[in-house]
Amino acid sequence: MFTFSKRKHWLASQPDLDLLNQQLEELQEQGLVVESVTPVTSLLGAIDCYVILLSDQQ
């Protein structure tokens, strides 16, 4: 399990989804399975980060 909160630049309001998708593809190529991707929001409803749950294929 890990969190992803990297943004394209410091003024961006949400995490960089292109970079998240790229990193998830790399993890899948290494044999990991993405079980879930859950957004974590602020009190105002803006997405601050994503929590990603991974598992081995074994």
Image: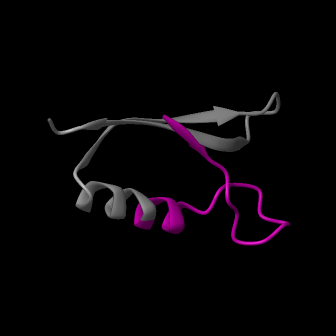
State yes or no: residue 13 in magenta: yes
24 displayed left or right of 55: right
Q: Is residue 3 above or below residue 22?
A: above
Q: Position of residue 20 (x, y in %)?
A: 50, 59
Q: Is residue 6 left or right of residue 13?
A: left
Query: Viewed as shown, does residue 24 lie left or right of 28?
Result: right
Looking at the image, is 8 positioned above or below residue 37? below
Residue lying at the far front of the rendered structure: 58
Query: Does 16 appear in magenta?
Result: yes
At horizontal 33% and vertical 62% (from top left) the residue drawn is 25
Q: Quadrant of residue 2?
A: top right
The residue shown at (77%, 64%) is 12
Q: From the viewer's perspective, tell me whether residue 18 is left or right of residue 12.
A: left
Q: Residue pushed farthest right?
A: 11
How many numbered marks, from 0 up?
0
Front-most of 43 and 3?
3
Snapshot colouring: one colour
For this orientation, the residue located farthest to the left is: 58
From the top left corner, tell me how far across and down residue 16 is, in percent.
Answer: 61, 63
Magenta segment range?
1-22
Instruction: Single out the residue that lies furthest toward the bottom.
Output: 9
Please identify the quarter of the rendering in which residue 37 is found.
top left
Residue 17 in percent (x, y) is at 53, 60
Is 40 situated above or below 7?
above
Residue at the spot 14% in from the left edge and 35% down from the top edge? 58
